[in-house]
Image: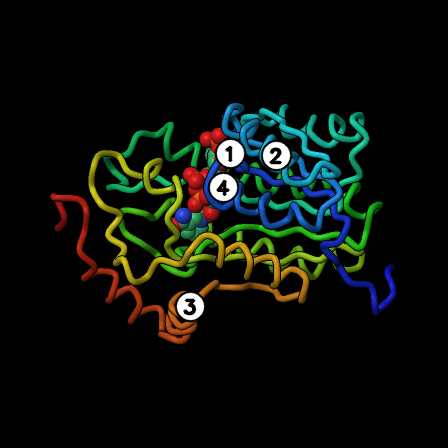
Amino acid sequence: MPGKRARFRLSGVTAVITGASSGLGAEFARQLAPHAAALVLVARREAEMNELAESLRRDRPALRVAVVVCDLADAGSRERLPGHLASLGFRVNLLVNNAGLGDYGEFATGAWHRLAAVMEVNMVALTHLAHVFVADLETAGPSGMLNVSSLAGELPIPDFGVYAATKAYVTRLSEALRIELRGRGIFVSVLAPGPVATGFGGVARRGSESLGQPKWSYVDKEKVVRLGLEALVRGRAVVYPGVVPTVAAWVFNALPRVVLRAILWRRPRKAADQP
Ligand SMILES: NC(=O)c1ccc[n+]([C@@H]2O[C@H](COP(=O)([O-])OP(=O)(O)OC[C@H]3O[C@@H](n4cnc5c(N)ncnc54)[C@H](OP(=O)(O)O)[C@@H]3O)[C@@H](O)[C@H]2O)c1
């Protein structure tokens, strides 16, 4: 059991960042680089990660950066990751569980393989990685685990129901792990952003439609990541980065569920065949 004064710090960190080929994951790598001893970039797109790794090494020759091409939908690849990193000499003390995707559109007409991928990557992979890295994080403690959820996790969103439900899972699981893993010297925080301009919309869209988020509700990815890392260092449970997401989360949680459902019932729908 770590002492009461033990704290997670970014300085000298060895971080595994999932979904590091794009968006928030790449930004996590950029913002962690000045503090880190080593970064491990994990995703499927190798060229994007190699380019990022090269630019990080150019700026900081002392920083060790590894690229691991991994489909997180594959359980075997997830299982092998800690052993692979240990064999390369990495002593991981931060897991940024960031990889994720959405599928925007009517549930009934959605392609099952897309809905299944949303659940597999957002929930199963995140949970599996948290589980397979616990031993390493405990050994290297005080350690950090930052799980990327979403403001969408606070709402039952028609046309985005599966995604929103996976993020509700991420937030609830992380709150429980925060309590459970503290005794092992692992500090768990949740980053739950509202809309951010990344590759997310392009993946979530089924066609050329808009995700229906007003422009003013977007927060820069730089700010989102900065507030996420600050939350982890300060030991905060859940952060909704930015004023709009913070106020929105407060309102969503304060409203009776019946009122929330009534509001969402009237939300403009993407699907043409609404009742
Ligand atoms: N952007 C938003 O508005 C927003 C809002 C709230 C929460 N979030 C959350 O933020 C996180 C990061 O998303 P983003 O906005 O940065 O979107 P993004 O630019 O599309 O990045 C998603 C990342 O996840 C990785 N990924 C997806 N499926 C994967 C798989 N099977 N195996 C390995 N990696 C996989 C992608 O890498 P590859 O394609 O190279 O594998 C990519 O690096 C997600 O969890 C998302 O739900 C985003």
Query: Is disc 1 surrounded by few (<14), some (14 to 19) or many (20+) residues within 10 Å?
Result: many
Q: Residues within 10 Å of mark 4 (few under 14, many from 20)?
A: many
| Amino acid on which the number 1 mark rests in the picture | Ser
Q: Residue at x 52, y 26 (%)?
A: 44
- Disc sitting over residue 21 in the figure: 1
| 28 or 235: nearer the viewer | 28
* Of labels 2 and 3, the one closer to you: 2
- Label 3's element? helix
Q: Answer whether labels 2 and 1 touch (C-beta < 8 Å).
A: yes
Q: Earlier in the sequence, mark 2 or mark 3?
A: 2
Badge 2 is on which residue?
41
Q: Which residue matches tag 4?
A: 122
Q: Amino acid at mark 2?
A: Leu
Can residue 120 be spotted in the picture? no
User: Are circles 1 and 3 on residues that touch, CB within 8 Å?
Assistant: no
Q: How much space separates mark 4 and mark 1, taking CA atoms?
A: 16 Å
Cβ of mark 1 under 8 Å from ligand 1: the answer is: yes
**Distance of label 1 from label 3 (alpha carbons):** 28 Å
Reading the chain from its start, which is encountered first: label 1 or label 3? 1
State whether label 3 is within 8 Å of ligand 1: no
Residue 261: x and y in percent read 29, 64
